[in-house]
Structures are given as structure tokens and as C-alpha cells.
Image: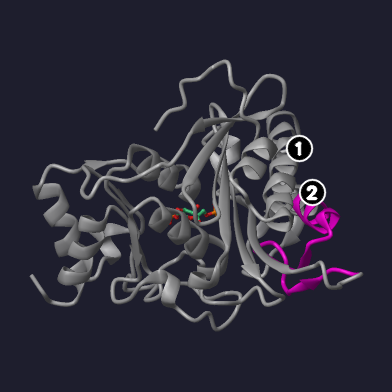
Amino acid sequence: MAVKSKHVRRGLWNHLMRTGVEMGLASIIYEVGVASKYVNHAMRTGDLGLAGTSNLYGEEQLALDVLADEIIKDRLDHTGRVSKIVSEEQSEIIIFERSGRRRQYAVCYDPLDGSSLVDVNLAVGTIVSIYPGDDPLQPGKNQVGAMFVVYGPRTTLVYSTGNGVFEFTLNSLGEYTLTRENIFMKEQGNLYSPGGLRSEYLPEHERYVASLEADGYKLRYSGGFVPDINQILLKGSGVFMYPATRKSPCGKLRLPFELNPMAYLVEQAGGGASTGTERILDVVPGDLDQRSPVYIGCRREVALAERILNGGE
Ligand code: AFP
């Protein structure tokens, strides 16, 4: 629901305190917000070239990928509440020094998902997943919070800690102010966001997509996971999918950095997220690089995918 009260400036920290978010968890969310302002600035003014390095997956890193990763890592350490982090841009788990009683959270994040879209001026994003304790590789259902930032025409931050999903927009003063509260998805929508090459679709997935098209669903796909999910979530309508294909039986998207946080947020907004055979948040992650097929959005569309993919229709 859009927030109409222009006069009550509800900043991010004020909101986190007012809604009773635990101080350590609140500081993580707030500090990622701070980091995103630097990432936002760098993206709109900085070097879009290659960093000359590559990540765990052998993908060439942009200077922006490396910069975003460093900024977010530093701000998470600064909270004093994070014990370990796993970044999509790092090849191993990072343990923060001075670990102690207060460092009670572990964080997985993708600092700049879709970064290859920046140089064609398409929206990209930061994705963050927060777990209790010091193990960042837990099933997604253990998350105590998740958030993403969309660097688009506006810079927006969406988070949940289990008591509603909220959107904040970065204003001209550099403040995140509340723009949507208690975001909730319809039972059924009319958008579909189909990742993967159609020529590589498996027959049952092809049947699913054809079913949506026969029902008049409109295709909305940018190639950026964060803006594509943001659209399905905020319009409350339809489904994003990146399926198992002939060449990639596990799909493309990564469980710890992309799927678990988005599945947490979409479920908190009344939607669903499935591998096609089981709930994303129930999957026990094996390693940093674990990928999974994904169907995420309104409950009806996700349930239909599970039925068709399992021979039910
Ligand atoms: P990059 O981070 O390498 O640009 O990939 C972005 C992404 O992982 C995710 O943001 C998109 O949903 C997906 O790739 C798009 O994949 P296709 O280019 O195969 O459609």
C-alpha cells in the first residue's frame, strides 16, 4: 500500500525502531542502506570498466562489482553485529575479526546483481540475506531478514524481518523514506518473467509457459533479477521463473545469494517460491555455488508450475 502521508517523513532507522526490529538486525539493514548510497553514486558517476579479476564462477568482475562488494563488506563489519559473510563476489566465507558475543548474525549477499546491464543503463540491484548465528549457509527458512536495493530510475530499498514487507525510496536529501508498507501480492496475476533460452526448455516447462500465454499473461523480462522480482512483487502480479533447461538442469540462479532472500520477501508478501518440486526456503544448501530452478510470485502461478512440472496437468 503506497504511503500517502507526505508530511510524516518516515526514515529507515525511525521505521526499524518503531516496528521493534532487534537493534543488531536493524543496524545491518540500515548499514546496507548506507552502503547502497555509495554504490548508487559510484554507478551513476564511476568507472564501468572491467576490474581485471574474476569471481568464484569465473565471471569477469566489473570495477563496480568489486567496489560494491568492498563497500557493503565494510559497512557490515562496521555494525559489529555480523560474524561471517558470504558474497557472490568472494570465493570463500569471510570471518570478521573481533568476533564475539554481539556478532550474532551471518549475511549472504550479492553486491551488484545484473551488473552486466549497467553499461546499457538498465536497472540492477543488491540482494541481502540475514541469518541468526554464524553459519551463512543455512536453509532459507532460517532467515531472520532479507532485503534488496533497486538502482533504477529511482533508488529503492525493500526489506522484511518477518512483520511485513516495506519499500523505502532514496530522496534528494540522501534519505530513505517509507513509500510502501505491508506490500501484499494477489492470489493470481497476469505477468510472467521467463528466464532461460526457450530452445533449451524442457517439455514440461514449455507446457507451463504455453499455459500462461494461453491465459493472456504479459511478458515482462529485463534480464535483471532484482528489477524483475521487484516488478512482480510491487505489482503483486504474476510469476518470475528461471527453469531447469537441457544445458543447465539446476537453472542459473544461486540459492544463497539470489533465491533465498527473494523467496523470503515474496513469501512474507503472501506469495510463493518453488524449485518446481519443493519450497525454495526448505532447500538445504550444499555449497556457495548451489543453483536451483525457480518459480516465484503469486501463489496460483507457483502452484500451477508445481502441478504441470510434476505431470499433474
Ligand atoms: P549477471 O549478474 O551475470 O548480469 O546475471 C544476472 C542474472 O544472474 C540475474 O540477475 C538475471 O535474472 C539472470 O542473470 C538473467 O539471465 P539470462 O541473461 O540468461 O536471461
Q: Please give left or right for residue 253 compared with residue 245 in the image.
A: right
Q: Residue 127 at x, y = what percent? A: 58, 53
| Quadrant into which the C terminus falls | bottom left
- Looking at the picture, which amino acid does disc 1 mark? Tyr
Q: Residue 21 at x, y = what percent? A: 63, 52
Circle 2 residue = 71
- Circle 1 SS class: helix
Specify start and end residues of the magenta stretch as a single range.
71-97
- Looking at the picture, which amino acid does disc 2 mark? Ile
| Quadrant into which the N terminus falls | top left
Q: Please give left or right for residue 308 compared with residue 180 in the image.
A: left
Q: Is residue 88 magenta?
A: yes
**Residue located 26% across and 57% down the image:** 299
**Residue located 13% across and 42% down the image:** 216
Nearer to the camera, 163 or 40: 163
Q: Residue furthest top?
A: 7
Q: Is residue 29 visible?
A: yes
Q: Is residue 247 magenta?
A: no
Are circles 2 and 1 on residues that touch, CB within 8 Å?
A: yes
Q: Residue 250 at x, y = what percent? A: 41, 75
- Pointer 1: residues within 10 angstroms few (<14), some, or many (20+)? some
Q: How far apart, in angstroms, are the residues tagged by discs 2 and 1?
A: 8 Å
Q: Quadrant of residue 182?
A: top left
Q: Earlier in the sequence, mark 2 or mark 1?
A: 1
